[in-house]
Image (tube, helix red, strand yellow):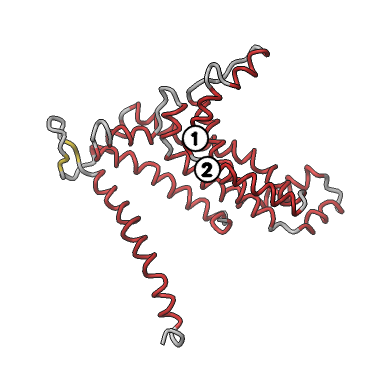
Amino acid sequence: MLDRRPGLRVGLLLTPPMLWLGVAYLGALAALLVTSLWTQDDFTGNIERIWTLDNFRQLFTVDVYRTITLRTIGIAALVTVVDAVLAFPIALYMAKVASPRTQRLLVIAVLTPLWASYLVKAYAWRGMLSADGPIAWIANPFGLDTPGYGLPAVIITLSYLWLPYMILPVYAGLERVPDSLLEASSDLGGGSWTTIRRVVLPMAFPALVAGSIFTFSLSLGDYITVQIVGGTSQLLGNVVYDNQGAANNLPFAAAVATVPIVVMVVYLALARRVGALEDL
C-alpha cells in the first residue's frame, strides 16, 4: 500500500519530526512570548498572569538594558567578523591549494576542538588570559600585558569557540567554485589578489553569510563565557540567567530572551535574500 502511495509514505516519515518541531520548539517559543506578557508581584514575587507590555517598556526605556542589548549585538557582530577574517584563508587553502590528504588532515584539525567540552575550552582561555598565564608570560618581555578579563577576553574566547562553525561552511562553499574560473582569471591577466577579490570572494560570500549565522547566533545567546572571562561585563544572556535564577522574574527574563529571537529572525531573513541558507 505504501509502495503505491509515495505521498503517504513521505507524510508518515515527516509526521514525527514535524510534531516534535511544533510541540517542543514552536510550543516553547509560544510559551516564552506569552510569559513575557505577564508580570511579577514586587511584594510576593509571584507571577501574575495579567497581560501587559511593562516588561518590554522597561527593556527599551531603561538605559542599562539598552546598553547591554547594543553591547551584545556589537560583540556578536565583531566575533563574526573576526571569525570570517580567520576562516577565509584557512578554508581557501583547504579547498583550492591543499592536496587531498592534507585536506583530510585539516578537516580533522578543524573538527578536533569540537570534541572537547565547551567549559574546558572556556576555562582554558581563562587560564591563558590570567595575570600569570602564558599570554602575560610571552607579552611581558615586550612591555605588553594580557588583556585580562573583560569584553576583549569575551571576544577572543567566543571567536575561538565558534571558528570551526565558520570554517566548514566557507570550505564547502569554496569547494564548489570551479577551478576553471580561477584559471580563466589568471589567463586574463588577473593576479592572485585580483582573483580573490573579484572572483573568489563574490562567490564565497553566501557561504560566509551562512557561517555567520552560526557565529552570530551562538555569540548572541552566550552567557557562560561572559561569566568565565567577562569580569563584570553583562550581556543579554546574563540578564536572562540572573532574572530567571536569583531574581526569579520569569516574565522579564522571557521579555529579554525575545530580543535575540527577533534579531535572528531579521538576520535569517537577510541571509535568505543572499542565498546563504542554501550553503548550510
Q: Position of residue 200 (x, y in %)?
A: 72, 50
The residue that appears at 24% across and 31% down in the rendered structure is: 247
Question: Is the residue 153 above or below the residue 80 in the image?
Answer: above
The image quarter in which residue 86 lies? top right
The mark nearer the N terminus, 2 or 1, is 1
Apparent side of residue 276 relative to residue 191 in the rendered image (left or right): left
- Image quadrant where one finds the N terminus: bottom left
Q: Position of residue 113 (x, y in %)?
A: 57, 41
> Which amino acid, mark 1?
Val
The residue that appears at 67% across and 50% down in the rendered structure is: 202
Provide the residue designation for mark 2. Answer: 215
Apparent side of residue 235 relative to residue 120 in the rendered image (left or right): left
Provide the residue designation for mark 1. Answer: 120
Question: Is the residue 237 above or below the residue 135 in the image?
Answer: below
The image quarter in which residue 140 lies? top right
**Mark 2, mark 1: which one is toward the viewer?**
1
The residue that appears at 71% across and 56% down in the rendered structure is: 177
The residue that appears at 40% across and 32% down in the rendered structure is: 235
Q: Position of residue 214 (x, y in %)?
A: 51, 46
The image quarter in which residue 228 lies? top left
